[in-house]
Image (spheres, rainbow, N blue to C red):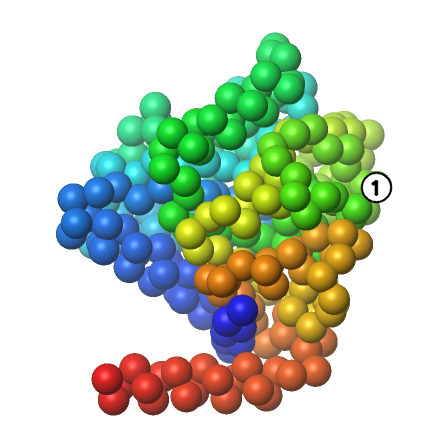
Amino acid sequence: MRVVILESSESVTQFAADEVCALLKERNAKGFGAVLGLATGGTPLGLYRELIARNARREITFANVETFNLDEYVGVPPDSPCSYHYYMLENLFQHIDIDLAMTHVPITHGVELQKSAEAFELQIEQAGGIDLQILGIGSDAHIGFNEIGSSLGSRTRVKTLTERTRQDNARYFGSIDDVPQTALTMGIQTILESQSILLLATGTGKAKAIRDTVEGPITASVPASALQLHPNVTLAIDRDAASGLANADYFLAAERNRAVASRSS
């Protein structure tokens, strides 16, 4: 697990944008489009704004990109301002040169949820799998909507949201009473099958979750700890989010040595 501790949330945004752009350019050079796994919430907003800007400057193109979002609230219509379909259109898709037919957010309204979950898994498989999965992390270390106690071998399915998650997300709704009780989410095993994973976290509110994810045991009580099992995970975090790490100095030294090795190669 690579832990990159950066000075600010803006630095986290730039690092993440560089990682995404490097992948897109590499895949385009080979004549292939990339498959991206995308997250919602407050943390990725800076990244999406930066990608929009780079696309506008024609530094990158999304013309051959396919995307899969982590999750969607159950029962919320796609055109609702509270849905993640709406979030993605407003904050990324309608501002870049992507084919909307190549964007996939779990369908949860007016469908049989189990069949929708199975269809979503099949779409990922037919796309050849996810090249890079972007993740945020909940204050209780959930990823996607894989709440505490989620199976580390789980697939896309319906999950009941904890009261803490609903409180954290109430700011996007009129009140906590309006926050849905359930969501359709990629499973932890689905996430772990991505070729690479980039988790973003900023602020002291995420410090404990980051500490438990990186330095704690692998346990269903800390869903993000399952990322320790993946061979190609990068955590891009600011100093506030890193403030709970006992081994922060080691991770900083590792990045300095990585930079030296890169310059000398």
Amino acid type shown at disc 1: Glu
In the figure, 158 relative to 204: above or below? above
Q: Residue at x 65, y 30 (%)?
A: 157
In the figure, 56 relative to 106: above or below? below
**Which quadrant would the N terminus be assigned to in this image?**
bottom right
Q: Residue at x 36, y 33 (%)?
A: 127
Q: Nearer the viewer, residue 58 or 123?
A: 123
Q: Is residue 230 visible?
A: yes
Label 1 crowd bin: few (<14), some (14–19), many (20+), radius 10 Å: few
Question: Could you tell me which secondary element the residue under label 1 belongs to?
Answer: helix
Count of number-bearing discs = 1
Q: Is residue 48 left or right of residue 80?
A: left
Q: Residue at x 36, y 42 (%)?
A: 35
Q: Nearer the viewer, residue 139 or 70?
A: 70
Q: Is residue 105 left or right of residue 93?
A: right
The residue identified by callout 1 is 163
Q: Is residue 118 left or right of residue 102?
A: right
Residue 195: x and y in percent read 42, 52
Q: Is residue 175 visible?
A: no
In the figure, 199 relative to 32: above or below? below
In the figure, 183 relative to 57: above or below? above
Residue 45: x and y in percent read 49, 50
Q: Nearer the viewer, residue 162 or 120?
A: 120
Q: Residue at x 61, y 35 (%)?
A: 155
Q: Is residue 264 left or right of residue 192?
A: left
**Which quadrant would the C terminus be assigned to in this image?**
bottom left
Residue 243: x and y in percent read 68, 77
Residue 21: x and y in percent read 30, 56
